[in-house]
């Protein structure tokens, strides 16, 4: 496995790969790798000649300085996990290397970013686009893999690809869940044992609402989820939105969309967790 810490090193390797006519699969990560990441790695490894990953905690996508500073970092362990999973090239840069003291670009995604994560985290998706667009250009990847827990992010990245007029294929991958149903996330490492024990209630409540979807209207599903979370003092529900899976715009009736997704963000033990449920 080649470890690159500069853009020039990365481009030199990937340009050689492209000259050889090989396909590149890219998995961008912020490190603190877990089994959810591994599921993406296995897919990228299986579907491409060369598997490239990045490990970079991107400062410009954090609108909360404390959240950025507390984001878990484990480079040594991350590199071992990548090597075990067949990574060919890993890019581990500094922020100075990525942005070269330049002002980050401003990306706009219209209504896609006016809801859920975009509404709650000003500038977040522009920050995501800054790093992902650079990685796409520097690696010349043919495919890039993202987990569906960040469903809104995938929609944003697809729109970014459209704006770039790029031919890269964006591959959404199913959420990897722990045995108790909690969606795998690097942030889970910050939970206390007591909080970790109650965290699976997020998926459990969403699943219950899905099981009752035939009998409940959109407003009733919303009320059901909100009321369920009120039963657990450990949680602070930030939002629960039922939206069209393509436009991401909230729906008021089931007839408005054949692809309704429930998007949720909750605070638990000072840690912000997100998840989705398809209805």
Image (spheres, rainbow, N blue to C red):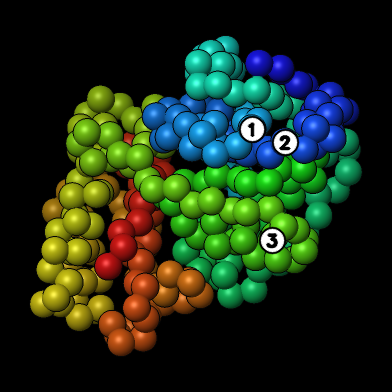
Rendering quarter of residue 182: top left
Residue 159 image position (x, y, % from top left)? 65, 65
Asked whether 136 or 263 is in front, the reply is: 136
Q: Earlier in the sequence, mark 2 or mark 3?
A: 2
In this rendering, would 220 be left or right of 14? left
The x, y position of residue 29, in whole percent, is 58, 35
Outermost residue toward the front? 21
The quarter of the rendered structure image containing the C terminus is bottom left
Contact, CB < 8 Å: mark 2 with mark 1? yes
Question: From what the image shows, is residue 47 above or below residue 260?
Answer: above
> Dot 2, how many residues are within 10 Å of its Cα: few (below 14), some (14-19), or many (20+)?
some
* Residues at marks 2 and 1, CA–CA distance in whole angstroms: 6 Å
Q: Is residue 258 left or right of residue 230?
A: right
Q: Is residue 98 above or below residue 262?
A: above
According to the image, label 2 marks what residue? 22
Mark 2 vs mark 3: give the one in front.
2
Q: Circle 1 sits on which residue?
A: 49
Disc 3 packing (10 Å; few <14; some 14–19; many ≥20): many
Q: Nearer the viewer, mark 3 or mark 1?
A: 1
Mark linked to residue 160: 3
Circles 2 and 3: CB distance less than 8 Å? no
Q: Is residue 163 visible?
A: yes
Residue at horizontal 55 percent and vertical 44 percent from the top? 145
Q: CA distance from mark 2 to mark 3?
A: 24 Å
**Compared with residue 26, is residue 9 higher up or lower down, i.e. above or below?**
above
Res. 53 in view: no
Label 1 secondary element: loop
């Amino acid at each position: 496995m080649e470890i690159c810490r500069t853009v020039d090193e990365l481009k030199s390797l990937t340009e050689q790969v492209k000259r050889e006519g090989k396909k590149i699969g890219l998995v961008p990560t912020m490190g603190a790798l877990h089994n959810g990441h591994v599921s993406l790695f296995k897919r990228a490894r299986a579907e491409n000649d060369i598997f490239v990953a990045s490990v970079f905690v991107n400062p410009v996508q954090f609108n909360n300085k404390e959240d950025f500073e507390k984001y878990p970092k484990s480079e040594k362990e991350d590199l071992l996990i990548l090597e075990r999973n067949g990574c060919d090239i890993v890019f581990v840069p500094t922020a100075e290397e990525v942005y070269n003291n330049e002002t980050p670009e401003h990306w706009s995604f219209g209504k896609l970013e006016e809801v859920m994560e975009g509404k709650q985290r000003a500038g977040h998706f522009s920050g995501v686009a800054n790093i992902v667009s650079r990685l796409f250009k520097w690696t010349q990847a043919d495919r890039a893999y993202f987990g569906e827990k960040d469903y809104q992010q995938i929609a944003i990245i697809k729109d970014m690809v459209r704006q770039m007029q790029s031919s890269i294929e964006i591959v959404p991958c199913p959420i990897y869940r722990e045995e108790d149903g909690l969606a795998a996330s690097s942030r889970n490492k910050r939970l206390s044992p007591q909080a970790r024990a109650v965290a699976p209630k997020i998926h459990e409540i969403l699943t219950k609402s899905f099981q009752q979807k035939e009998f409940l209207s959109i407003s009733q599903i919303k009320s059901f989820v909100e009321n369920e979370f009120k039963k657990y003092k450990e949680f602070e529900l930030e939002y629960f939105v039922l939206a069209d899976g393509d436009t991401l715009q909230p729906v008021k009736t089931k007839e408005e969309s054949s692809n309704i997704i429930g998007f949720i963000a909750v605070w638990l033990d000072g840690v912000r967790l997100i998840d989705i449920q398809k209805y």
